[in-house]
Amino acid sequence: MAQEGLWCILAANKRPPAGREQRTLTEFNATCNQLPEPLRGIVQAVLLPGESLCAVFQPDLDDQLKYCDGLVLLTDRRLLAKEGAELRSWPLAQVERLQARDRGGLATLEALGPSARLACWYHTVGRAAAAHDLVDAFDRLAAGHEPSGPDHDDDLPVPEGETPTAPVNVRSLFRLFRFARAHTAALTLGLLLTLGGTAAGLVPPYLTWPLVDKVLEPYQDHVKELRSPSGISDREARARGIERERVAGFRRVGFYLIAFAGASLLAWALGWAQGWVLAWISERISADLRNTTYAHLQKLSLDYFGTKRTGDLVARISNDTDRICSFLSDTLVDFIADVLMILGTAVVLISIDPILAAATLCTFPIIAWLTVHLRDRMTHGFLQNGRAWDVVTSLLADTIPGIRVVKAFAQEKREIERFRAANLRIIAAADRVNRVWTFFWPTVALLTQIGLLVVWVVGAWEVFSGRVTVGVLVAFLAYIGRFYARLESMSRMATSTQKAAASSQRLFEILDRLPGVPEPAHPVHPEKIGGAIEIRNASFRFGSRQVIDGVSLEVKPGEMIGLVGTTGAGKSTLVNLVCRFYDVSEGAVLVDGTDIRSFPIAEYRRHIGIVLQDPFLFWGSIAENIAYGKPNATRAEIVAAARTARAHEFILQLSDGYDSLVGERGHTLSGGERQRISIARALLIDPSILILDEATSSVDTQTEREIQEALDNLVRGRTTIAIAHRLSTLHKADRLVVLEHGRVVEVGQHADLLAAGGRYAQLYQAQKLGQDLGSPEPPRELLPVLPEREGGDA
Amino acid sequence: MTDNAATLPIRLNHDAFGRLVVTLADGESHSGVVPVRAFPFSAPDQWISLCDESGHEVICLNDMAELDREARDQLAAELARREFIPRILRVLRVVEGGVASQWFVESDRGDTSFELPSADNIRRMGNDGALLIDSHGIRYRIVSVPQLDAHSRRILRRYL
């Protein structure tokens, strides 16, 4: 906990006070005072008078790579390290260089002297950012800067993101109540109906008691008495009114039976109404759940989708909500009815005869204990089961869209094998669960039989000892049948409850995920965006990898910038930062002088048009696809955009023109056609900022020329950042920016860069060489693609 | 002659080979043009493009109503000759056979039957309409499902 606090403080330290005046000593001590106890005490103890603290870093591994808290301090005079009780220190003059490295989760920070390594600290990659900060602070000190805040950092306060309330981790099923709240009235009605139905259900067995004790038995006794050996003939007996007695008794039987039937009918009607009401509610709750989950999913940033498999997410939204729905409508209702019934029965039983009641209820604690005991094992099993299902759905979601690759490489057999293996996991997980519950149910059935036996024994004894009448015993037996039936159904419920609990846990896993790109707390609404982009010392780390490292770039409105660099140079990431698919780790991206983190995300993106390497077309007509970013566009606008994008004529050649349906990925269209539709899509929203991410890399040169015409129309008058491997695509760019390892290495125009003979010239020569070597390409300035393709750095 | 104030000065007629010839306002004429509806379902009478034989657009008519009566009749006749999308008026019966199904319908072009390869070949068009594509790629339209008779609706409900 203390460490987490420290991260915050380190992060806060990076934000310098307003102005760039030199920080005073007291301010540094204030920094020190911000440290959490007991760290502050330790730090204060080792600092000399007048020495000020510049950076704090806590390595969390020792040199044997075992977890161990260490401490490395950088002051304006010394580098200090505390390992256990031992304190080592080096005057800054001795330290030539600090070096932070990380690889595969393990990171090191090394202090290097002029002739040897002074020290090396190991830490996990989670602390790498802090280690880098320490190195940065050292570099600034070494450069002779005042020990002030990072001098390249700007004065601009970082816009504060909305801080969503952290989710409270309660049992996931109870969290469903949040969704039930909207239907309180209907729920109350449902519960009242359940209560009424239960009460009505308790009446019929109760009636057996008077039926036996007050009607049948007295009549039987009466007849016996009349026929007793004292010797009265049948005739006499009849004369004494057996017939009258019989008729009267029969009437009473009729009364009880009609009441019996009436109560049963009432219970049926109430049960029906209750089932309908609760099913209605559960259907709505699960729809809410689906909507909420999907809406939340849409808000999550791209990096979430990068780590998730499509099929898994699909399964969560479809299967898991469905499972919860059936739990809410069937199981939960049954459960409530069961609990009420059991409680009601218990009350009635105790009021009739406490001893018999105690005998009836004796197996109840055992069943309850068994249920609780096995529940955890079952939840675990069902979660495992769910995960196994995820693998299967993910496999399907993977291979069905990629079926062409599968067939092209003749890997059908392997895919079938993979599917079989995934299926085996389902079987294994299911077997584990099944072993538990198949034991569980017969055990419960056995316990109920034992309970019945106990009641018979105790009942018989009580009847013989004259404590209760036969009628009471009969009523008890009638109740007990229901009681144990309910108990059994309740224990069956354990299964579906655990399933639903696992499902809701998986759903809340999505819902609890905070969007990586937060909405601003104090949004600035962009009226119109001019298109001036300023990337101010932006850095971006992807895990431990520094993808963008202190890039600064200013783009004037209407300017076209070409981003050039090898694979993994950070081109796509830089563009993603401008689009705010991710947020910068350090520095800022400003548009028209405002930090883009101040704009509401959707409003900001409305001003950005993006044309991607692989244009995605949604299922729908071409007109709908073009109008995706502006659904209320008129047909005139759609046609105009398509014309400018050079798509109009080929669309007319399709059988249904603009109303033609295109598939999931637009399979019926060629790459160039899809690309032109996506350009029309970007044109229609008339963006001020345009991003072209490898827009022409997947097509042949002829198609490229057509697309290039469309692109030239698109680029006109807009601030454009274009990435391309074919350097020729960038011939219209005002400036070329060459990136390497996340840093800007060259900026300039094509001719100047070529003359300078730097990195750009090398890239250009490489492409030219490729051209000379081969293809009978049209001369122009079209050049073949670089051997590698981008893909890894997003 | 005209029943619309804003008429386009375009003339349409057929030449001796039966090809459609369009004469534009500037007197330039193109023969062998083909009228194409850009939005055949959502806006059939607007955005009709006249393309030449190689598929290049000669002129795009935003609305048929902008033409004078004679040109409009010519265009309508040409479109009618070029388009074959029977409109289904009644679904008589459907014989299911595995995935595919045989449909017997009454259309505005007479009674016919066709094979529907799968239920995916029925698409909703707008709110009420539907489009059926048979195994040969011929399209059949239903303008409004709710306006069909009860028997047809009952059959279609299984597929929509």
Image: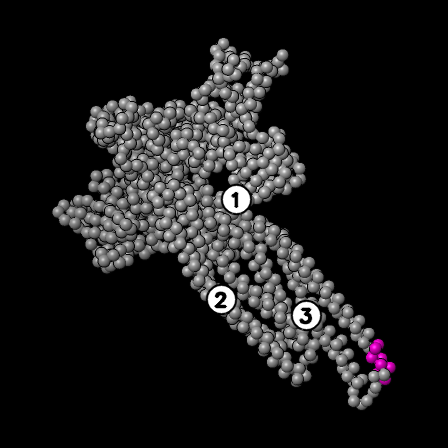
Chain ID, mark 3: A
- The answer to whether marks 1 and 2 sit on the same chain is no
Foreground: disc 1 or disc 3: 1
Per the image, the residue denoted by label 1 is: B99
Quarter placement of the N terminus of chain A: bottom left
In the rendering, at what x and y percent does residue A120 appear? 21, 51
Q: Main secondary structure of the magenta part?
A: helix
In the rendering, at what x and y percent does residue A290 appear? 51, 47
Magenta part of the chain: A236-244
Task: Give the image quarter of residue A586.
Answer: top left
Position of residue B128 relative to residue A65, above or below, is above
The type of residue carrying mark 1 is: Val
Chain ID, mark 2: A
Residue B85 vs residue A380, the one in the foreground: B85
Q: Is residue A714 visible?
A: yes
Q: Residues within 10 Å of mark 2 (few under 14, many from 20)?
A: few
Chain ID, mark 1: B
